[in-house]
Image (cartoon, rainbow, N blue to C red):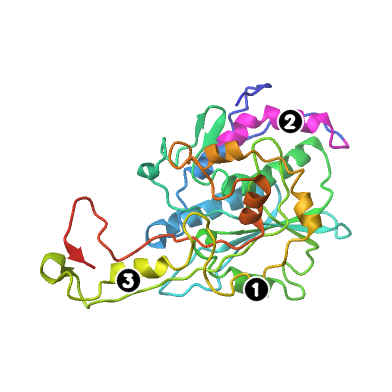
Amino acid sequence: FETKIMSTNSTTDQPIKKARTSSLDDSYFEYVEANKSLYISRLAEAVAIPSVSSNLEVHLPDINRMMDWTKSHIERLNGKTTLLPNPAATEELPLPPILLGEFTLDPKKKTVCVYGHLDVQPAHKDDGWDTDPFVLTEKDGKLFGRGSTDDKGPALGWLWTIEAHQNLGIELPVNVKLLYEGMEEYGSDGMFEAIKSLSKPGEFLNDVDFFCISDNYWLGKSKPCLTYGLRGLAYFELAVDCSQQDLHSGVLGGTLHEGMTDLIALLNTLVESGTGKILVDGIMDDVTKVTPEEEKSYETIDFDMESYIDDCKVRGVSDTLLHKDKTALLMARWRFPSLSIHGIQGAFADPGAKTVIP
């Protein structure tokens, strides 16, 4: 990245102020460019907070700190904030609050509610990262850091957009509400109950006209895209027991049913290797049929298969994808169900060898 307009306060937490204007013209984009270093430094602060929701025992304080950090920026911009206690929290299982923010300027204007999340998935350098995942690092004009795109960068970008409007004297065209959670990467505990409660008459979400889920990706590197639908998620766990304790394979192997062998056999019945076809009976019954009009709409989508191979890091490994043409691949990615196996627990996974039947 390169900053074209510099200022002595560009590395502080105060943005460069430009002359007031009445419309979104070139001055807005000049302002954003001039404050690029500031936006990057703020993102680095956010990335440095390891708000990992899958390990609350260790990282609940970090998620709470991320919530407070974001809350302070909303308040700095004269927005109203509330930290809503998580409705799914218990004394045995404390959960992070849900952050509500509000910039309501004119009740006659439409209201947009932005959803985002401030928690992240676990990350360790030995997962394949070239650098510390919690240190925002610039490499080849790109920024790498856990949460930089999913979802701290997009969620916080709304605040900097509001800030830019304020400092340029441009009135927001809509009222903006923010709904930011800290458990998205681990099942969104409490979020559904909160939305149901907040949607009642007179509550936070009741006057919202539009929702924007600010938690998705560009299709490529050159053109933004607007996501207007998601496939959803159903998550299952399958357990196979073969004994009440670990057993020695050298002594008992070949004499009893082994859980690992049977589990892998069951998993192998779910997806056809080489095609990705789901083998579960009836899985496609409720999937809407592809119309000629829909299929034709894929023809003009800007998508490069070779770049996708590079982005997925499979070049030099398999060098191939499950689909040979753009339309089939994008349909598999967007409109058809997929089935992925995420991991096996309960088996020996430490370095070395162990002759154990788990």
Decide if residue 13 is in sight here: no
Range of residues picked out in magenta: 22-41
User: Which image quarter holds the C terminus?
Assistant: bottom left
Q: The residue under label 2 is which amino acid type?
A: Tyr
**Residue at screen point 19% across, 70% down:** 246
Please name the predominant secondary structure of the magenta segment in the image.
helix
Residue 184 lies in what quarter of the image?
bottom right
User: Which image quarter holds the N terminus?
Assistant: top right
Residue at image mark 2: 31
Residue nearest the observer in this picture, 155 or 172: 155
How crowded is the residue under tag 3: few (<14 C-alpha within 10 Å), some, or many (20+)?
some
Residue nearest the observer in this picture, 318 or 114: 318
**Residue at screen point 49% across, 54% down:** 274
How many labels sit on residues? Answer: 3
Residue at image mark 1: 285
SS at circle 2: helix
**Residue 357 falls within the magenta-colored stretch:** no
> Are the residues at dot 3 and dot 1 in contact (C-beta closer than 8 Å)?
no
Q: CA distance from mark 2 to mark 3?
A: 61 Å
On screen, 210 above or below 29?
Answer: below
Residue 71's spot in the image, x, y percent? Answer: 60, 53
Residue at image mark 3: 262
Residue 242's spot in the image, x, y percent? Answer: 26, 76
SS at circle 1: loop
First-in-chain label (2 vs 3): 2
How crowded is the residue under tag 1: few (<14 C-alpha within 10 Å), some, or many (20+)?
few
